[in-house]
Structure formats: structure tokens, C-alpha cells
Amino acid sequence: MPAQIISGKEVSAQVRARLKKEVEEMKAQDPNFSPGLVVLQVGDRDDSNLYISMKIKAAAEIGINATHMRLPKTATENEVLERIREVNENSSIHGLIVQLPLDSVNKMDTEKVTNAVAPEKDVDGLTSINAGKLARGDLGDCFLPCTPNGCMELIKQTGISIAGKKAVVVGRSKIVGAPMRDLLLWSHATVTTCHSRTANLSEEVSNADILVVGIGKAEMVKGDWIKKGAVVIDCGINHVPDESKPSGKRVVGDVDCTAAKEQAGFITPVPGGVGPMTVAMLMANTVLGAKRFLDSHQPGKWNISYTELNLQKPVPSDIVISRSCVPKPIDCMAREVGLLSDEVELYGKTKAKVQLSIMKRLQAQPDGKYVVVTGITPTPLGEGKSTTTIGLVQALGAHLKLNVFACVRQPSQGPTFGIKGGAAGGGYSQVIPMEEFNLHLTGDIHAITAANNLVAAAIDARIFHENTQTDKALYNRLVPISGGQRQFSPIQINRLKKLGIEKTDPNTLTDEEVTRFARLDMNPEAVTWQRVLDTNDRFLRKITIGQSPTEKGFTREAQFDITVASEIMAVLALTSSLADMRQRLANMVVATSKSGQPITTEDLGVSGALAVLMRDAIKPNLMQTLEGTPVFVHAGPFANIAHGNSSILADKIALKLVGPEGFVVTEAGFGADIGMEKFFNIKCRYSGLRPHVVVLVATVRALKMHGGGPKVTAGMPLPKEYVEENLELLETGCGNMKKQIENARLFGVPVVVAVNAFKTDTQAELELICSVAKAAGAFDAVRCSHWAEGGAGAVALGQAVQKASESPSDFKFLYDVELPIADKIRIIAQKIYGADDIELLPEAQRKVELYTKQGFGNLPICMAKTHLSLSHDADKKGVPTGFVVPVRDIKASVGAGFLFPLVGTMPTIPGLPTRPCFYDIDLDPETEQVNGLF
């Protein structure tokens, strides 16, 4: 009875149908996902082109996104390796085939090239790593070579059990023979490998229950060699002369098929046997690679290691603690939290930037829980919001084993060298390395400085040129002749459209249109944009510019702000994408024209350049805590004239990465009446995010000050009221905490009070705060010792936050932005500060009318007042009553998207004290270690 034919075409069709269904299931799970395959070819061989076209066609039928990457014959080995590296790092590609042979005029090391393919993308199964895993029997952790894998599928189609059978493989190539031997061996066959120099080859073949031939010689294996009933798999493709064929030749295998049919039980035809299976298994490997990628990159599925703290008593200085802990390599941290290699830009070993492309990859994934840390009204004694933020995430991550991200602001270098010092947390709850955190980090603040000052330079240059040129001369320089013609730039076209001039040919503008286009006519008295510097320098608070003779007497008074006060910093913190940032930068109002029109950076023609300067700064910075939990450090706007919160982008990315059961903990600047109110009414309004929990930080000593405790002098011992038990003073001061709990609950979010304990606090004092907090409506109140104990000291806080996040919440904004400006200010003053009313002083009233007329009346409000009191008077502690808030002026950050009323006076660039921090700072030239920074 002749052998049964094993049709590779039929089996491969079944495999392709199964793969197509699997791909459809993947896309149903994530509509933005598709398996990706790249076929890299060097040269232009006809046979290679044919094979590649078959692969591309098969991929398209299944739903695989396949790309043919063709390099010329002149390509060098280095060029090929570079293209392979690019594909290796492309997370949308799950399979890479290097088409062999490499048809180049240059010398190529084929082994080196094939081994350059990342093992997890080596769908041909040719790298040494995949071959080694196959040889060791790690079949579930490698890619099986396509032809041998296809042969195994064909053998399985016969229904014959491989285990215990005698198998003979004729051929020992790395592509077919050697891996075929391994596959049969690990399927429990007894395997003999033969080759062209095997003695008594016919005798060896005659013993085979399963025979696989891939030796590359036409019909070398004769029919009478084959054991009766054997399974014969013929991998050969050879051409022999045949005058009956139009081509003069026909395709035959390595087995004499006609004679073999009479002996074998099953046999594969040539063509139509193994060939179709090779392509099918290549597709199967690509789909498998995509599945493995999805499995290993499931949002919220972290494989993270935590760092164990070696707690010391007494607690050493912050810098000693920071240096005692060796941070994980930041690329390791990135992998642990689900970031892909092409989504991360490394800045050394301990910090990295994260590409915004991750937002598209994770857009369909649910968000985690959102927590904001705020505090009672600040005092000189400090409350420890940053330390609590870091302690909480260390507790949630390293101790409660939940996915958690901290999102914090980048500190200004001004206070670092001035009076405040660093801002990385403290004790055993820090962001590390603290030197990196507190100094240049990745240069974001420097980018803002450059962008801000470019705008300032553009303003004064434009005023100067308009003052010294006729309309025609100004227009000719703004739209110069180049290549024999004038042409508007895209940003100039935007200005024409804003003016209602629908023309694109510079030669067609009327004289009146030329004047309107060329002259911004800025009022020097109404320039609101200032230069910035990230240094505390009191002598730049008021300056005169333009005193050089070259400026022809056009001087004006101006000032410097500290960089973090720049509107560009606020834009960075509130933007949601690169396109959104570009538009916000364009919308920034820098001056008013003499006719009362707002002048923007787009009018100046500088907004595109600003986006270029900010293109890296927009990417969040990845760092870590002492206990190895991830931190995003991004943006650091002032908390008085701006909203005092880290970036929306960092929060959004983190919320996707942690998964639905994870937590993102961010911190709002100053007390709840300032930073938290702006977090809700400004940041959440623009982000669309809804917080689950407010953590309100309080301390015994700070509440005692609010209860009427004596003033504290820096460098002097604390008065006894703060270091001895005084329940009466403390209970009076708890009024401030109760008011801030009330403020948080106005927004419909549950509040957990974190009592940051000091060693001088008594048990009775701590219990008093907790009982008062709960009675005031807090969901819970817990004692914390994270400064001395790290995450272990905030486990109770973490558990309380976890429970609170599961409780019902009814988040709402405090006011409708469509209300009149004065009404919005009044609502904040009365409901948050406890004021009786507001008073708009003449300049503030004028600005209300101006901004309403200019169309900015519907922006949210960002109150700029003292952070040291609920009122406008910094000396009034506790819960002041019976006061009216005086608003002396209102300014607009139109690009960022808010108006900021000024209550009282406040410097926008700090000064240096008599003895600044820089006295203690130096560099060790031997170790390159920074000393005395903190």
C-alpha cells in the first residue's frame, strides 16, 4: 500500500487560520496592538525577493504588520548591525528575520550578523542563545527554528507517537539538521544524526521509524533504504534537468519520492511539503513573540525588587543615609515598572527621561488610584510633606507590595544654595541620589531659563526695531527676499490669519495691512514678561535695561524672577502633550499693545522656537526612593504665583503604569488652602483626573504654633512649649487642621491625616490629634514615623490610604470657571480661607475689566498670597476670622491657563541670607563627591 501524503499546504493553512484567530483576539484585547515583523535584506537576489514576498503575503493574511527593510549591496557590516540594533529597540516589532545569504559587495560575518538579533525577536531561531536553549531542552523559553518546527508539526499530523521511536536525521546544518535532532530528542525519540560521510548510510536509514532528510543532494536517499511504514520528511529542494518542463528542470527532494512511497507509511511531497510549513512556522513564531511581549508588558504587572534599609539610631544626616544606599541602575528600574527600552532615554546610571509615546501604548489601560499629599498651614517648624510623600510610597510598595509611583516637583537651585537646602525628602524617606535630584537633574530648569529669556530678548528687540524703523523697512526685514522672492514663514501666516488677512503672498498686502502685520506696537509700560535666573539674587528684583549706547536711549525698568516662577514652568506642569504645549506656549501673553490688545509669543514669532527648546523638558524624569520604588520628578512651578504641583504628564503616565490596583502619590505645595486648592481647581480641571484620597500632614509642634505657641528663631533651641507636653495649646492649634480637613472635604474627597511624629511628642498629644481629626470628618488619622523608619514607619498610613481609596467619593470643583472673575476670587476667599469678603483695589479692578474684555475672564483662579496663614496676614496663625482679603493686582498666565490675583507683596526671586548654604558646599577632587550640600 503506497504511503499517505502529508500535505504541507493543508497543515500550513490550518496553522495560518489558527494564527489569524489569535491575532484577532490580541487586537480585541488592545485595538492599538499588532504583531510586528521586519524582514531585513541586503542586496537584491531574485530568490531572496521571492521568499520575502511569500513571507510578507502570509503575514498580511494573518494580520501581522510586516515590513521589508531593504539595504543596498553596498551596505557595510556596521550599517547592517546598526539597522538590527534599531529594530531590536523598537517595541512595536516582535520578530526580525535576516534574509540569507547577505548579498553585499562588502565582507560580512553572517554569524555575527545573525547573533546581533535580539533573542526575543529571533523568530528564525538562529541565534546562538536560542540554539543553546533548544540544545538544553528549554523549549518554552526560546524560538524553535522554523523548518524543523514545521517538520515536527507534519510528524504530529500522522498521529504516530514520537516517544520511543528510532529517528534518523540526515544532515547536520545549523538551520535544519542540528535543531531537528534536538527537537526529536526532547520529544523522547532515540536519535541518530547522519551526514554525507556516515559509513553504511543506507543501513542507518533502514532502522528509522522517523526519517528526516535535509542534506541538499537530489534524491540521495533511495526508496529501498527506507523501513516499511516509516514516516519520511523530505526537506530538500533541488533542481534536476527535465526537458518536458518549460524551464527545462523540475524540483525534487533529497529522497527518491517515487520509490520511497512504496515503502513509507507517510511521506511529504516536494514541493508542497516542508516548504509551506517553514513560512507558517515563521508566522507562528512572530505571533508567539507578540504574545510573550504582551504577557511580559501587561500594565500593572511589575516584577520589582525593593531595597532593604539598614536603619541606624540615632538617625544619620540625610546625605549619609542617601550615600549608604546603592540605587538600582535606572534602566533596571524602568524595566521593572513596565517601561520599554525605546521609551526610556538614559541620563547616566540613576536618572532617565520617559518618552511620551508610552501614553499611546497604554491609552486603553485603566488608571490606578490617585492620592494627593498636602498639609496644614505651614510654619517655620516644618510639617514634612515631601518626607511623608516618599515614606508613603515606600510603605505602599516595599512593605504592602502594591504598585506605586511618587510624582514630585523638581526643586529650584536657588533655595538649594540659599537658605532652605534640598527638597528630596529626609531621613529614611528620600529620593536618591539626592545630589542629582537637587542640582541640574536632566536640565529641564535650564531649558526653561533659555526659553523664557529668549522671549524676553525678543520683546525688547522688537520694541527697539519698531522704534527705529519705518513700516516698510520693518516689513522688508521681517519678510526678506530669499532666492529672488519674499515668503511668509508658517508662524507669520498664523499672525496674518489672527489679523483677518487671508493672504499668503507678501507682495499683495496693502500699506495698511503691512503696518498691522509689522507693528506689534507694544506698550513698554505694559510688558508683563520678565527675565529669569535659577539663583537667589535680590539685586535683580528691580533693574534698568537698555543702558548701552547701542540701544539709542530706549531704556525701561524691568526685573528678574527665579526660573520656577516663569510661566513656561507652569505650562510644562499643566500640558497634556507636545501639541498642547506648543499651543500653550503660543498663547502666552507677554505684553499689551498701546491699543489694549494682548500680545502673545505667537505674535512675536518665537513660539515655535520655544517648543524646540522645551522638546526634551516635556519628558518626565525617572528616579527612585531609598527603598527602590519609582519616582517621577517633573516640573516645579511656584506655589504662590503659580499652582505649585508637579506635571500632569507624569501623573498620567504613572497612573497607567501602576495599573488599576496601584497608587500614584503626588504632593501639592504649601498648605491645603494653597497647593491642594490649586491641585483640585486648576490641575485636575485641566488633566481630567479625579483624586481618590487627600493625605493631610500635621505635626504636634506646628499645631502648637497655630495654637499660640511662641515664635521660633533659627539656630536657637526650641522653646519648652514645643518639646514638652501641652495638650491645651495643641488642642487650640488643632483648629487649623480641622479647617484644612473641611477644605479638603469641600471637594468631596476622603481625607486621611498623617501625624508626622517627632521623638519629643507624647502619646497623649498624638492621640489627641488623631481623635480631633476623626471628629472633624477625617476618614482616618494615623501616627507615622517614616523619617526614622522609612516605609515601615508609614505602613499604617498606607493601609489607611488603601481603605480610603475604596470609599465613596463625590469629587467636585469649588467654582464654575464661567463665573465673573471677582466671584471666583470671593468663593475661594470665603470658603477656603474663611474670609468675610474680598476687596478689589483699583489696579485689580482695572485688570478684571481688561481681562474680561480680552476674553480671559473664564480662566481658573490661582491665588498668590502668603502660605503662612489662612488669611492674607502671615502673622495670623490658627484659624483667623473677621478679615477681608485685599487684592492689589491681578496678572494673567494665559498660556498656562489661569489668572493670579496678588494678595499682599511677595518677592518672585528670593535673596541670599547672611550665611547661605553655599558656605558648606564643596567638591572632593579625589572622589568627585559633593560635600555639604544638605
Image (cartoon, rainbow, N blue to C red):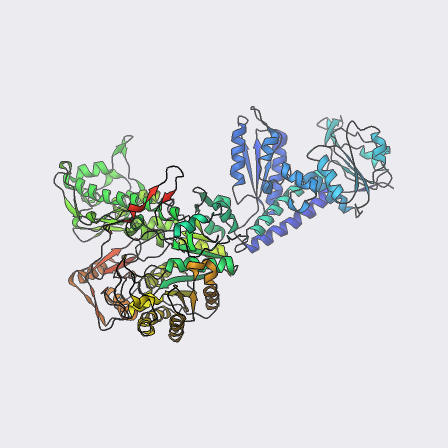
Q: Position of residue 593 (x, y in %)?
A: 18, 50
280 to 317, vertically: above or below: above
Q: Position of residue 781 (x, y in %)?
A: 42, 69
Camera-nearest residue between 550 and 404: 404
In this picture, residue 794 sits left or right of residue 531:
right
Residue 843 visible in the displayed image = yes
Camera-nearest residue between 497 and 765: 765
In this picture, residue 48 sits left or right of residue 1:
left
Q: Position of residue 642 (x, y in %)?
A: 29, 56
Q: Which residue sits at x=60%, y=34%? A: 114
Res 250 → quadrant: top right
Residue 815 visible in the displayed image = no
Camera-nearest residue between 430 and 218: 430
Quadrant including the N terminus: top right
In this picture, residue 712 sits left or right of residue 211:
left
Camera-nearest residue between 884 and 8: 884
Q: Which residue sits at x=52%, y=48%? A: 335
Q: Position of residue 375 (x, y in %)?
A: 35, 64
788 to 566, vertically: above or below: below
132 to 668, vertically: above or below: above
